[in-house]
Amino acid sequence: MKTNLLYAFRNIKKNQVNSLITVVGLSLAIACSLIIFYIVSQENSYDNFHKNADKIYRINYTTKYVFGDDKDVRVEPELADQLKKEIPQIDKSAEYRFAFEQQLRFNNNYYDVRLGLASEDFLDMFSFGFITGKLPKILSNPFEILITRKLADKLITGKKNYNDLLGKTIEFPLNYSKNTFKIIGVLEDIPKNSSISFDAIISGKTGRNFGGCDNSFGYTSVFYQVKDDAKTKDANSNVVRFVNKYYKARVEDMQKNNQLVKTNDAFVPFVLPLKDLYLKGDINNCFESSTSQERLMILMALGLIILIIACSNYTILSLGQYLKKVGAVGIRKSMGATVANILAVFMSEGFILTLIAFFIGGMLCSFLIPIVENLTQAKIFTELIDIRKTIVFCLALFSGIVVFTSIIPVIVFSKVSPHQMAGKKLSVGNRTRLSQFFVAFQYSVSIILIIVTLFFVRQANFLKNQPLGFDTTNIIDINIERMKNSQKDVFKRIISEAPGVTNLTMTARDFLNGDSNSFVDKGNGEQVLVNRFEIDNQYLLTLGLKLIEGTDFTEKNMKPGDRSMIVNHKFVETLGIEDDPIGKIYPFNGINFTIIGVVEDYHFYDMKSKIKPAMLCTRADIWNSYNNLLVKFQPKELHSLIKHIKNTYAELAPGQTLTYTFWDEQLKKRYEDEERWSKIIGLSSLIAILISSLGLFGLTILLINQRIKEIGVRKVNGASAWEVMVTFYKSFISWLLGSFVISMPIAYYIVNSWLSNFPYKVDISWWVFIIAGSMALFIAVITVSWQTWRAATRNPVESLRYE
């Protein structure tokens, strides 16, 4: 062992360039692997801290509407109590939902809070720790509230004695007629790896008074806990059967009304264990956070690709280095060395280089973490890092790199007899298929990543810059949900008189948060889902929506009892009334509305969704009150206008927090996800290309050193430096062209599969592939040019003086 290590140290010292290339490549790959491991292990740790996590499940279901399929969690809260009564294997069950954008008042100060609503069993099922105030029947009283340490720290003054808060009252002034809640306990802060998160929690018995996020099947999620001695499979089967039975009549009614397809799988309930919930981002869920498991797989794949490229570099350079000095290995075999002995030689050097790379990669990891966090928007919490798992991962990674980079050269040498190696009949370069394979693989991966990155960037820019069908510039979106209705009218009037305001309008919701919809009968019994917007008579003018036919809303339409509506072109097209839509009457939730106008289609959702039928009506108090004030302004007056808005809001709603956004900026944030992933893949491409280029640089040095005499002979016979360089270029370009041919269909498949998720997308243009290939060619030429130029311009006497 000692001899092998000494031999490895000498070899590393003699081949400093190869060793440096190997260490740099492996360091980058190890840093990326560690970061991805932290992210993936953290995401997989969600909800594992609950004591009963293995026994807790959530109800979910798939639905097949006539307009498309969906997955959801929202059910009726009564299911929670009935499950425990009807199914003997269930020990506890609870509803849980989340109230949006709540503001509480305590000691005449206002605080924005994340408010949860749950039933009695909730805190018995989940392991959210108590600091003080734990009671036997928590969440049984609709006017009691528990708060977290984070919120308690805001409410308490002076010395932090949380017991001083017990019995104090909190108000939600805009949400409930009897709005006083008594603080009965303080909880520990919710762990960062919890899919359920809140600042305060109250009883679900308060009903629907804190807003809702509902559909045809309910407005809350329901969890249940299986008894210790019960068979989980049987319990879950019983739950599925019970939910089917519970909704049977409702499903049949929806099928009769042509809202659901008339098949047996129109409504299919299923259950998921608590530990799997966070990674199920494909389920429509208003209440718990989630992510996409596919994205974690992408991250893992990118890390693996970078690691393989780095290991391939090491293998190529290691193999070439030993082929150059085959005599030493030949002598070892002649003296009786076995495959295991040769493997130990290779592994000793691999061990040393990998150890150095791990040390550098660890430091590089800490430097790259903030960059990766910024790109992925996935915070890496150091307190969630499992040291034991990290050690196991590092040991496995270390061992894998050493074995992978050692085993291939050993396999090559094991097939060659000692007299062949002693005679130095082996060569490397264009006659070594293994080297060609690794180079082709590396550049194929690099070209694929370049192509995918270019299309990610193109699609993100396409989504951001496509016309939406309405004016998005110079519009301030002010949240007025927390104002009283009387204050909203006054606020609008005062802001309308401010200098720089060209127009403004109130609406029940903007295009950024939430949605409202209703079913409408097409006339033949078929139901169509229509998006609903409650607006005032300045809406079309403020947003620049184009009226195709009919009339706009007037002050007359703002009066109580008016049932007029304006629809988009998709509405009249879907309902088949394009010839004469004006005057047609359609019922929405039992209220008849008459079409008075038709506007051109516009993207009220993002460009990732198809335009759907929409109706616009006034008198928002039919369903809700106005929640947003959209102000169209002149840019030169923006500073004074913002000041005026702040002062007016503070005067009308003292103590409350003003929230506003600039609409064009907010609308572009819809596509942050696409931009983020284009950056992630772009960064991965950059690292992969850098490592590939390092390997190609090292391989170039190796080939040049092997052909140094050939270069001297060529120059003696009159070859120019350029002709010598072209000779080398031919080998590399042939490898690159082969890589390009291999990578094109793979890249096309990946891009086409990804773009198929978008209804509006860029074309898969051939020139993008040409650009990617040209970029790879340029990088390859730059990589090999310096060394080939040095070799081509060297005095041939230096190459041939010993011949």
Image (spheres, grey):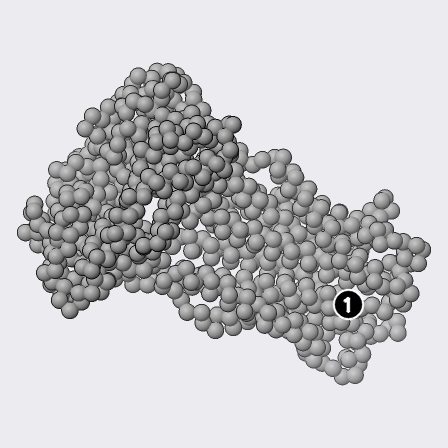
Q: Position of residue 88 (x, y in %)?
A: 43, 29
Quadrant position of residue 552: bottom left
Question: In the image, 575: left or right of 16?
Answer: left
Question: In the image, 310: left or right of 469?
Answer: right
Question: In the image, 711: left or right of 213?
Answer: right
Q: Position of residue 509 (x, y in %)?
A: 23, 47
Q: Which residue is drawn at 43% across and 20% down?
A: 131
Q: Which residue is drawn at 68% across and 42% down?
A: 395
Q: Where is residue 361 in the image (x, y as percent from the top left)?
A: 63, 46
Question: In the figure, 554 relative to 426: above or below?
Answer: above
* Residue extending furthest toward the right: 335
Q: Is residue 429 visible?
A: no
Crowd band around label 1 with a 10 angstrom C-alpha radius: few (<14), some (14–19), many (20+): many
From the image, which quarter does the N terminus lie in? top right
Element under disc 1:
loop
Question: In the figure, 31 relative to 458: above or below?
Answer: above
Q: Mark 1 points at which residue?
A: 428
Hey, what amino acid is under mark 1? Val
Q: Which residue is drawn at 24% across and 33% down?
A: 209
